[in-house]
Image (spheres, rainbow, N blue to C red):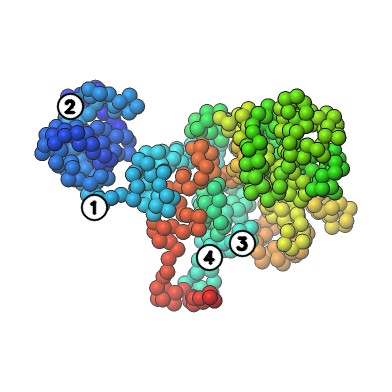
Amino acid sequence: MMQNRTHTCGELRLANAGKQVKISGWMENIRAVSANLAFIVVRDFYGTTQVVAESEDMVDTFKAINKESTISVEGIVRERDSKNSKLPTGDIEVVPAKVEVLGRCRHNELPFQVNRSREADENARLKYRYLDLRNPAVKENIVLRCNVVSALRQGMTEHGFLEITTPILTASSPEGARDYLVPARNHPGKFYALPQAPQQFKQLLMTSGFDRYFQIAPCFRDEDARADRSPGEFYQLDMEMAFASQEDVFAVIEDVLPPIFAKYGKYNRASSAPFLRIPFAEAMEKYGTDKPDLRIDLTVQDVTELLGGCGFGPFEGTKVKAVAVSEFHETRKFIDKTLADVEVVSGGKPYWFRLDENGEIVGGIAKFVQPIKDSVVSALGLQPNTLVALSAGELARKTAGVLVKTLGAAVPGHMEKEQYAFCWIVDFPMYEVGEESGELEFCHNPFSMPSGGLESLLKAERGEIDPLTITADQYDLVCNGVELSSGAVRNHDPEIMVKAFEMVRLGEEDVKAKFPAMYNAFTYGAPPHAGIAPGVDRMVMLLAGEDSIREIIPFPMNKNAADIMMDAPGEVTQKQLDELHIALVKPEE
């Protein structure tokens, strides 16, 4: 028994009928039927209970209390005449003898109706998040998050991993995103950085002799928000294994994640081990993306030779990609709207034609395809009632990938939605040509081991191979078209590390300056090691079936990385700035 209640609001059943009880919670609603009859709903973390006021005095008592006030109700449990089969407590009600206000809501009007808060404006939800979280539907996502984190911890511990926390205040490091900087009061002009990931620390743990490490790690990156990315901070299941290969990492993840997805997911079916492995180059050609949604049965075909000379201007002298959608019975209006949506997302203009029920080429660019109809039908294996969506130019591959995703989800019969389809994307390029610099840059992770080790780098240096052909021992875990994590076999050899950085115009002194601890540690004999870091936020978002990551974070920021509930970021006093040796320079108007 607790001080303010004998039972929770989700606990009482018919077996409790006739008992004197005390429940506490928020007064969710009151429905006054007459001067001496009112029905009140009391809600706590565990559920709701109906209270029935049957006297004028008791009705007046409840009517004087604002909704969302916290109250305690003492009374007798009885069987309801009109039962509610949708509620666990729907067979009973409480007839009150005493009501006490524990925490009064001093607002006659609420910013939104709590049990319908998900319909409210997002800014209102974020500003009054403490009210939004009272909504059971919102609360369930946070409970799910707790359960998933607990299951992850249990799974990693059972596999012999030690949970070790790494520093939050650390040094700035070039890891792909902007750092959050923290001024150091005792070191004027110097700054800590919040870690973008525990990457260097976990590799140092391997060098220190710890065999298996993990943590539910907070990571901080100053980057823009997306539907699947929270600005500012996020959490990942960070792990690393010594004396390990890619296969060892895969084995752990393929054992830990599927049971969690099957148990806690919106869909009760998840890929079993081994997950499908798709080389990066194949994924880009076949799906138009390195994040394929394997629930969709559509793929991309290269039709450059087939249609490049058909006489249609946008196809001449460039790559042409096709996505064939069988059993297509949608309208022209549907086609126009869907392809317009694809163009907005991809930036590339899609084209189309259709093989109708009579086997005739119709619509879109049909007049250019008609002369080579037989070749096209044969090469693409077309059947009547098939839509062929096409893309061309520099954005052909990207546009085709968006076509696959959009048409697969929109056209009935091409997406088996209620499952979690995992795959590994492997063999990423080690290097790429930077869009802005026009020079060789790391493609993915500079700490990855190049496939072939030092020898492949030396061959590229000697001009025997193109450095763009060098792949890395790195991998992404993808689920339902969402990248859950990136990982790699690490480059633990100082000689190979220096040579890898020399390829992007950084010498040994640069490596020592940028990564001093890790470079020096590796010179004392580092074991081969590998790891990965699945994103907890994205994982829970998938499990909950949510489209926005903010729905599964207790106190999320808005799209501009602002916490409008706490009014952060905010101004500080001049005294604070002076202590930190900081002078503010106002931007020019």
Element carrying mark 4: strand
Element carrying mark 2: loop
Q: How far apart in space, not on screen, are marks 1 and 2 (Cα)?
A: 33 Å
Lower position in the chain sequence, tag 1 or tag 2: 2
Lower position in the chain sequence, tag 2 or tag 4: 2
Q: State the image quarter where residue 275 is shown.
A: top right
- Whether tag 2 and tag 4 are in contact, CB under 8 A, the answer is no
Lower position in the chain sequence, tag 1 or tag 4: 1
140 relative to 58 in the view: left or right: right
Task: Identify the residue under disc 4.
Answer: 181
Name the residue nearer the viewer: 284 or 252: 284
Lower position in the chain sequence, tag 1 or tag 3: 1
**Residue type of the residue flagged with mark 3:** Ser
Element carrying mark 1: loop
Name the residue nearer the viewer: 368 or 307: 368
Task: Identify the residue under disc 2.
Answer: 19
Q: How far apart in space, not on screen, are marks 3 and 4 (Cα)?
A: 11 Å
Q: Is residue 580 visible?
A: yes
Lower position in the chain sequence, tag 2 or tag 3: 2
Task: Identify the residue under disc 3.
Answer: 173
**Residue type of the residue flagged with mark 1:** Arg
Element carrying mark 3: loop
Task: Identify the residue under disc 1.
Answer: 106
Rate crowding at label 3 as few (under 14), some (14 to 19) or many (20 or more) other CA atoms within 10 Å: some
- Residue drawn where x is 54% and y is 53% of the image: 225
**Residue type of the residue flagged with mark 4:** Leu
Q: How far apart in space, not on screen, are marks 1 and 4 (Cα)?
A: 40 Å
- Residue drawn where x is 71% and y is 53% of the image: 443
Name the residue nearer the viewer: 396 or 151: 396
